[in-house]
Image (cartoon, helix red, strand yellow):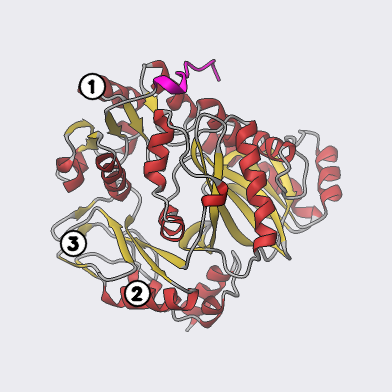
Amino acid sequence: MPETSEQPAASRRFETVLIANRGEIAVRIEHACRDLGLKTIAICSEADRDAPYVRSADSFLCIGPSSAAKSYLNQDAILLAARLTGAGAIHPGYGFLSENAAFADAVERAGLIFIGPPALSIATMGDKIAAKRAMMAAGVPCVPGPDTALPDDPASVERVALDIGYPVIVKAAGGGGGRGMRVVPMADQLHEAIALTREEARKAFGSPSLYMEKFLQHPRHIEIQIICDGHGNAVWLGHRDCSMQRRHQKVVEEAPAPGIAPEIIHPVGMACVEACRQIGYRGVGTFEFLYQDGAFYFIEMNTRLQVEHPVTEMTSGVDIVRAQIKAAEGHVLDLTQDGVTCDGHSFECRINAEDPDTFLPSAGVITRLVLPQGSGIRVDTHIHAGYKVSPYYDSLIAKLIVHAPTRAKAMARMCEALAGIEIEGIATSIPFLRDLFEDHAFARGETDIHYLEQWLKLRRAA
């Protein structure tokens, strides 16, 4: 990573934000910018030219064809769009270029503000081995396993696995999104798993570097949301449970994570804050942990806005996107840890344009749309009746979020909201989500990261 041209915090003011993303997160960023009195510039591909959020921005520019590689992932085109439209800052949203350290550095070198952490922080936390080393130095609990890359020598690899104890999991150092990892239950499967994962890592992430950790068999996926300014101040905003996953992809998230006592989670949250200070972090980010038998184990940090940030907004009362933009401007954080309160309970359902049984993507025109309304109900979306769902991008079309005083009441409210939402013209995951919220084990909070896959197998067999 080259030396960055990071500007001093005091000189980071801007008036116009280019939103380098699409869909519901582009809408969310647009709203936060307007709340702060900032002008917005939308970019779009040919497929998204007529999207409402594109037209509602103060200005917009089509930067390429429908393919994401030639539009939303085209760094040169985005930087050119910023220069042509007079943008002062670029917000990457999530996905696409949001965790690309080279892009963050290029934005700053172009004299613009990257609404996210410094490029060096992104690079450090993007390398899972470097991230683990940094977390161990800050006192963040980590999954058992060395903070070094696996050696090439087979005998040395075998010793690492024996020291950790089977089962182990082999992961790509530059991986993410559930890719580049394999569970190894016993020694005779080790070398094949490493060979396959190395090749997958090389193709997907450009590096064959791997590391190894203990495979926890019944963990939950717990996240801690943080916000940092550029002046050494940082807070954590409570915790989320994201254990309901299919193929390592989150389906439902909730805050707070049920059944975790404050005295257990508090020191972990404070360790995350200290880690951010040590690596010079700025903006928002999420620490992801596995939680099993009362212990937390760090797995990675997402150096961007999370899809599931609304559940934390609903329980903390903090506008996370607004805080992210203010941190990029150089403002001192106007929130202290003592001032963070988390009230009630919130759920988020990801609504995807996909078949609820096969999970195959479903493209087409939405012919009818009815969204639920009422106290404690929020819908983040970019769709409308007549909207054409494109086959080119992620299938997420809406996020349904609810909030209530207790988990049981929030669950009941989500059931009501799911019953009231109607999307016709395409297949969606709504029927699947309705069934899931009727599940008794889920209602009791007795699930782990493997539960949903098992539940789906039983559902298909019924």
Q: Which residue is mark 1?
A: 86
Image quadrant containing the N terminus: top right
Please name the residue that numbered disc 2 is placed on.
431
Q: Reading the chain from its start, which is encountered first: label 3 or label 2?
A: 3
- Asked whether residue 249 is in view, the answer is yes
Q: Secondary structure at mark 3?
A: loop
**Which badge, 3 or 1, is on the more N-terminal residue?**
1
Report how far apart the C-alphas of labels 3 and 1 lie in the structure. Answer: 35 Å
Residue shown at the point (42%, 51%) measured from the top left? 318
Left or right of residue 424: residue 406: right
Q: Which residue is mark 3?
A: 366
CB contact under 8 Å: marks 3 and 1: no
Q: CA distance from mark 3 to mark 2?
A: 17 Å
Reply yes or no: does residue 413 show up in magenta: no
Q: Are marks 3 and 2 in contact (CB under 8 Å)?
A: no
Q: What residue is shown at x 47% (from left), y 19% (from top)?
A: 6
Quarter-of-image position of residue 292? bottom right
Question: Which callout, 3 or 1, points to the residue nearer the camera?
Answer: 1
